């Protein structure tokens, strides 16, 4: 297996001393737009009745589902592959295959096993609801991670 190089870029705005980085100083020069001034401040009106509770239908995805920004604004909805990636991401660290930027290893086989088990639960609970690509991807990933875990534990 070939090793992949990982490049780490520090994108924080401030240094460890609390100073603004020189790359971010141009942001400091921009002034935020001033809010429009009104003659009277808004006054909150008391509620006359209980707020209505919106019932979820069969096709609703949950609270705030109507507020998802359209893709034309640069937002792309997360996919099943994104979810699997979020759960699987720490496994390489906990198996000791990936190193921290300072070269330190975070090998912790118990936590690696926990995350592999979480992927297994996701696979079992989503059975029958996945596309063939998603099913194959998750099944293959679980196989590879289990194999690597067994190699590490001996």
Image (cartoon, helix red, strand yellow):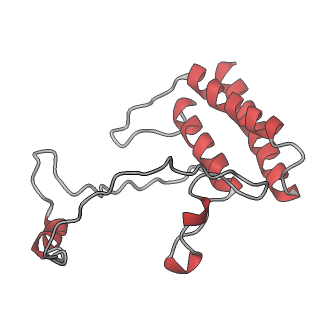
In the rendered structure, the answer to whether residue 69 lies left or right of residue 1 reads left
Residue at 70% over, 28% down:
117
In the rendered structure, the answer to whether residue 72 lies left or right of residue 131 reads left
Vertical side of 152 occupied by 85: above or below: below
Residue that extends furthest to the bottom in the rendered view of this protein: 72
Residue at 51% over, 50% down:
51
In the rendered structure, the answer to whether residue 143 lies left or right of residue 88 reads right
**Horizontal and vertical percent position of residue 52:** 57, 51
Picture quadrant where residue 134 is located: bottom right
**Horizontal and vertical percent position of residue 23:** 19, 68
**Horizontal and vertical percent position of residue 62:** 64, 52
**Horizontal and vertical percent position of residue 79:** 67, 59
Report whether residue 1 is seen.
no
Q: Quadrant of the C terminus?
A: top right
Tally the marks.
Answer: 0
Picture quadrant where residue 132 is located: bottom right
Residue at 56% over, 57% down:
64
Vertical side of 28 occupied by 118: above or below: above
Q: Nearer the viewer, residue 33 or 87?
A: 33
Residue that extends furthest to the front in the rendered view of this protein: 48
Report whether residue 68 is seen.
yes
Q: Nearer the viewer, residue 153 or 127?
A: 127
Q: Nearer the viewer, residue 107 or 40?
A: 40
Picture quadrant where residue 13 is located: bottom left
Residue at 57% over, 74% down:
70
């Amino acid at each position: 297996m070939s090793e992949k190089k990982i490049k780490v870029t520090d994108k924080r705005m401030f240094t460890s001393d609390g100073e603004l980085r020189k790359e971010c100083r141009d942001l400091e020069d921009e002034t935020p737009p001033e809010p429009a001034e009104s003659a009277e401040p808004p006054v909150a009106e008391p509620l006359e009745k209980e707020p209505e509770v919106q019932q979820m239908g069969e096709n609703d995805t949950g609270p705030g589902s109507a507020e998802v920004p359209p893709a034309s604004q640069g937002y792309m909805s997360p996919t099943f592959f994104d979810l699997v990636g979020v759960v699987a991401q720490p496994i390489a660290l906990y198996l000791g295959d990936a190193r921290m930027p300072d070269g330190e290893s975070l090998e912790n086989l118990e936590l690696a096993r926990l995350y592999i088990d979480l992927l297994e639960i996701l696979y079992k609970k989503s059975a029958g609801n996945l596309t063939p690509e998603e099913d194959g991807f998750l099944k293959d990933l679980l196989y590879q991670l289990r194999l690597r875990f067994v190699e590490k534990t001996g």
